[in-house]
Amino acid sequence: MSLRARGLASASRPGSPGGTCPQASETGALAVQEGRQGAEEVTDEPLYRDRVCGIDIGKAEMYATIRVPSDKNPARRASETRSFATTKRGVLELADWMRCWQVPAVVMEATSDYWKGPFCRLEAEGFECVLADARQVKNLPGRPKRDPSDSSWLAQCFERGSVRPCFVAEPEFRVIRLHTRYRRDLTEDRTREKNRAEKLLESAAIKLSSVVTDLHGVTGRDIMDHLIAGERNPRILARLARGRARVKIRELEQALDGAEFFTSRHAALLQAMLARIDQINAKISELSAIIEDLLAPWEEQLQQAESMPGWGRTSAQDILAGTGPDMTRFPTGRHLASRGGRTPLDKQSGKRHGQARHKKGNKYVAGATGETAISAGKTQTREGARYRKLARTRGKNKACVALGNTQLKVYHKLLSNPGMRYEDLGPDYYDNPARVRRQVNALEKRARELGYALVPDLTGCPEAA
């Protein structure tokens, strides 16, 4: 096998791990330090993996360090570091170099999006690829921070089993996820444009958004179109109200009184914003059709997700694309909730307790579960009752995170059992007789401690009559 890696290839020597490899120095280990080849004997600790490779990836260049058993003493380790380009040719050279040393597995740090190209290429070449969280493999303070040393540190952590692999979607879902994420990004762009339009009207003393429920609904959009066309009479504009907004004509007249401050410059800006919103709406509709086609083989999983309160078609597609249909990737529902950032992040040391925040997780899954939690909180279901119960005592933000945690656990259970559908326990789940009895007993005990006695009020009770 000929090497395509950087450096000169030398003849194969007896005892080398296979193929044509660079010749070792007299001490029996391979290393590249400061641009020269040197040898050092390193570590004789028990290992989790025998032959590994660690890669520190940049935008145009990456450094790779292999660690294999030493030729002279198998209990010792030999290491070598080389640099490669992140292009297809560079990654293939890295693959040949790893095959030369019979390295089956490689670990790399999740650096921006730069890891995706080498990861997919090496995965296609048949290597076991592990993606490491940068926070878990951060180098120790005081040590030099250089790409070659970082790749060596990754390899050392990997061979000792200190790297917990990050979730990486299956190849087909990587494409689906690109579409769902782009659709969510466009939705956020549309929201920003709508907010700009509302601020523009406010700057021109038009209080339309304080009267109509949806500024970009039928009524609001018709009024804005007439404003752009040059109409300034508040009575004529208020008569454009449709549907339930007809009962607010008087309020609309007052909100639109002052439209004389809306100049032609304002109209040109508003027209550009509305055109941008229409353009985004068209692109979102186009993406939704593509996503429907891509997720057609997983219609059953989508139906399972949509059976949950607060889950619509879009949210089910977003979360399925972010987690995949295979729930064996997550040992329990708690692991999936952690993936979605719907779990608490404890920071405790001794008697000091840190801020009670939730984990960040995947922002796209977290964003979708945030929407489903708020929607479910408005329903007369067990999840809605849980949201309202927590919101009263701990606030809406914590209630949203807690309900999202519950929803992801239920989602994990549903997809782990094909054909299962969500069965609601009812909005009175937290008011069942046993729970009420425990609450009454607690109140009676507290009353006795304070020297009082609870007397039941039987007014209106049939048994008392």
Image: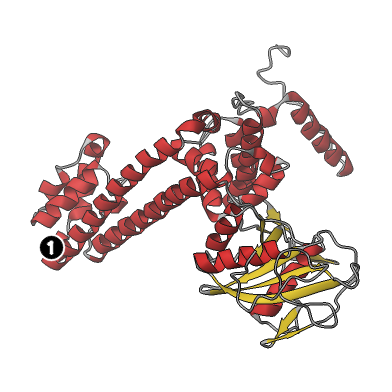
Q: Is residue 138 visible?
A: no
**Residue 247 placed where, x, y %?**
24, 37
Tell me the residue at 79%/63% (across/down): 159
Image quadrant holding the C terminus, namely: top right
* Mark 1 crowdedness (10 Å alpha carbons): few <14, some 14-19, many ≥20: some
Residue at the spot 57% in from the left edge and 46% down from the top edge: 170
Residue 444 picture location, percent across and down: 83, 35
- Quickly name the residue at label 1: 260
How many marks are shown on the rendered structure?
1
| Residue 68, visible in the rendered structure | yes
Q: Residue shown at 64%/50% (left/top)?
A: 339
The x, y position of residue 8, in whole percent, is: 64, 79
Q: Quadrant of residue 353?
A: bottom right
Q: Which quadrant holds the N terminus?
A: bottom right
Relative to 257, 131 lies left or right? right
Q: Secondary structure at mark 1?
A: helix
**Amino acid carrying mark 1 in the image:** Glu
